[in-house]
Amino acid sequence: MAKFTQFDLQADLLSTITSLGYIDLTPIQEVVIPPALRGTSLIARSPTGSGKTHAFLVPIFNKINRNNSEIQAIILSPTRELAKQTADFARLIAKDFPEIRILLLAGGEEKSRNISALSKKPHIVIATPGRLKDLGLENTVTSLMSAKTIVLDEADMLLDSGFFPVIDEILKTLVAPQIMVFSATIPASLINLMAKYFKDVSVLETGSSATSTQVEHFLIDSRHQDSHQLVYDFIKWKQPYFLLVFASTKQEVSTLYKFLLAKGIKVGIIHGDLPTRERKTMMKRINNDDFPVVVASDMAARGLDFTHVSEVLNVNLPNNLEYYFHRAGRTGRYQDKGEVYTIYDSDNLAKPRKLIEQKVNFSFLFYQDGSFTDDKRPRLVEREKPRFKKTSELDVEIQKTVAKTRSKKIKPNYKKKVQQAVAKTKQKHRREVIRKDIRRQQEERYRSKAKNSDE
């Protein structure tokens, strides 16, 4: 297996990452670190949990000029939680290098402190785009022009969240920077945007899917039963070490959270509308393993490194199916095994079928009377249709009626007359069916009486 020692890294940096347990390279680190060390701009796609963060942090630290008090690298994240997580990773590496200054700029951090720290010219700035624009561009606390490397982490979410106008402003202030783009999914629109900033745009990627091969995928047919009760029964069934439950709206997250609390489940919650203080406290408690179950919106699906998620349960599927892979990527990280379960019913088949078309290999379960059973004939799977459709007597009569009513010349109220004629034919057919049924019952009673008299 390839190792970090194969790269020409500074000796003290190599010693530090070795002490942190980073010895063997993950596939994405193996393909990204060489061009990153050369200063090459790149786009990288890899399954979540595959080590993307250290694929850009290690080259950045290796190139930092510790004697130069200027901003040398900027890392942009779509959410404050992801920015903080990246900053925590960076600070672990920097523990042996007190001369390297790292600054986190994100919502929930006091602006006055941010301004003071930014004026001291940190070497590495890890930020959300809005806060960096607010402090680094509009307030002109310090110049960003000295930055030689910029990283766009979870870049497709940056794009979806409408941050690219801000990113464009930031990139315009830099002089020929190295741009490194990372995400679990790389839409064509993102590649087209990046072509504006550097030539020869190509995607470095590892793995054939956006989730780890260590992850198993399951679809649960709810049979239209209550989804909240299903989640509760699922928890009792699996007895999870750490279950992450996803719902598509903040309202659904809050409602399910309250339901599980009322059922006596020790459950956490994370979504974008939580107050800053509550979000910080909740994230700290989640990372301290205080909850075996956490209910979350898609904000938690993007890059947050919750360790050792044993199962993911989707109460419903997101409108953007790429988020399915981000949700699934919360488990099966760092070679751990994981399981992803998704609830569906016969009214919601289109999205699961699209995932099957995208080569997600599902196993099927159905939920009934509080238990989960293997589904041998899932309704989601298309049944083989008969080659020839048998025409019923009613269909034949309707066809005859339409033919009689139809005229070569289109006359006023033509469609209405056809509809009325068809309705009369259906009514006549229903009466005939009832008459036949009455005759059948009379004949059965007559035969029964005759049989009894013979006995």
Image (tube, rainbow, N blue to C red):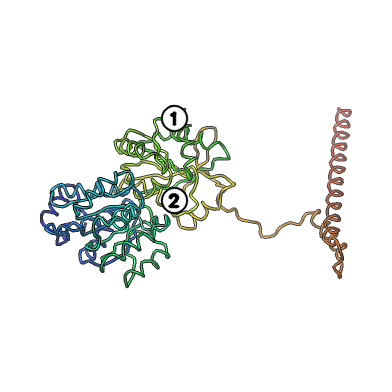
Q: Position of residue 104 (x, y in %)?
A: 26, 49
Identity, as a three-letter code, of the amino acid under mark 1: Leu
In terms of image quadrants, where is residue 398? bottom right
Return the residue at label 1: 261
Of 74 and 305, which appears nearest the observer?
74
Q: Quadrant of the C terminus?
A: top right
Q: Is residue 112 left or right of residue 239?
A: left
Other residues around mark 2 within 10 Å, as few (<14) / some (14–19) / many (≥20): many
Q: Is residue 29 above or below residue 39?
A: above
Q: Position of residue 198 (x, y in %)?
A: 31, 70
Q: Is residue 442 above or below residue 96?
A: above
The residue mark sitting in front, 2 or 1, is: 1
Q: Position of residue 388 (x, y in %)?
A: 69, 60
Q: Position of residue 332 (x, y in %)?
A: 34, 47
Q: For the view shown, which residue lies furthest in the bottom direction?
A: 199
Return the residue at label 2: 324
Of 121 and 387, which appears nearest the observer?
121
Give how far apart the Cα atoms at labels 2 and 1 are: 26 Å
